[in-house]
Image (tube, grey):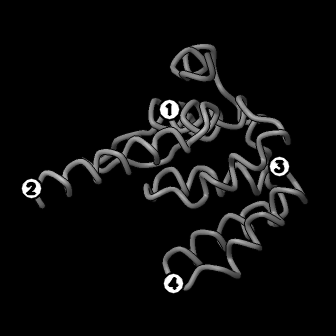
Amino acid sequence: MVRTRRVLTSLVLSVALLCAQSTRYRQLRLVIDRNTGFAHATRGVNMYTLYALRGCITERDIPVLRDLLRDRDRIIRLAVSSVLADLGTVGKTVIQVRLSEVTDAREKLMLQESLDTVARSGYRPILQYPLTDAERGRIRGCN
C-alpha cells in the first residue's frame, strides 16, 4: 500500500513537472539536443548548436532562456549561456543574475566564460559565423 502510494506520488509529480515546462521550453531544448555534437564519445556544444538555437530565438524568449539556464542538463545550460550572452545587454543581465545565485564553481566558471567571450575584441556574433551551404544544411533549427 505504501509502495503503491509512493509510485503514484512520483508519477503525479513527474507529470506535473512536464506540464510546468512550457511548449517553447521543450522546443528550444529539442533544438539544442538535435544539434549537439559528439567528439571522443562526449556530448557537447558546437557552432551548429549555438547557431541553431540563436536562429530560433528573439528577446521575447528571454524568460524561457532564463528557465533553461537552470535546466538539469549541463549541455543545455552551456548552450543557453552562450546564446544569452550573444543577445546583448538583456541576455548578459540574465547571466549576471544567475551568476550571483549559483554556488557551484564549475557553473560560475561556465557563466563567466560566456560573458568574457562576448567581451573580447574581435568577437563575432553567432549568426555571423561563416558557414557553407553544406554546414547550414546540417543545422536542425526550429520547426
Residue type, mark 3 in image: Leu
Tell me if mark 3 has few (under 14), some (14-19) or many (20+) residues whose alpha carbon lies within 10 angstroms of its own: some
Q: Nearer the viewer, residue 59 or 23?
A: 23
Q: CA distance from mark 3 to mark 1?
A: 20 Å
Residue type, mark 4 in image: Ala
Residue 51: percent from the left, percent from the top? 65, 35
Tell me if mark 4 has few (under 14), some (14-19) or many (20+) residues whose alpha carbon lies within 10 angstroms of its own: few
Residue 108: percent from the left, percent from the top? 59, 78
Q: CA distance from mark 2 to mark 1?
A: 38 Å
State which mark lies toward you, 2 or 3.
2
Residue labelled with disc 1: 30
Residue 14: percent from the left, percent from the top? 36, 47
Q: Quadrant of the C terminus?
A: top right
Residue type, mark 2 in image: Met
Question: Which secondary structure lies at badge 1?
Answer: helix
Q: Residue furthest front?
A: 1
- Disc on the earlier residue, 2 or 3: 2
Residue labelled with disc 3: 87
Q: Nearer the viewer, residue 39 or 25?
A: 25
Residue appearing at x 77%, y 41% in the figure: 61
Question: Which secondary structure lies at badge 2?
Answer: loop
Question: Which secondary structure lies at badge 3?
Answer: loop
Q: Quadrant of the N terminus?
A: bottom left
Residue labelled with disc 2: 1
Tell me if mark 2 has few (under 14), some (14-19) or many (20+) residues whose alpha carbon lies within 10 angstroms of its own: few
Residue labelled with disc 4: 105
Tell me: 45 left or right of 113. Answer: left
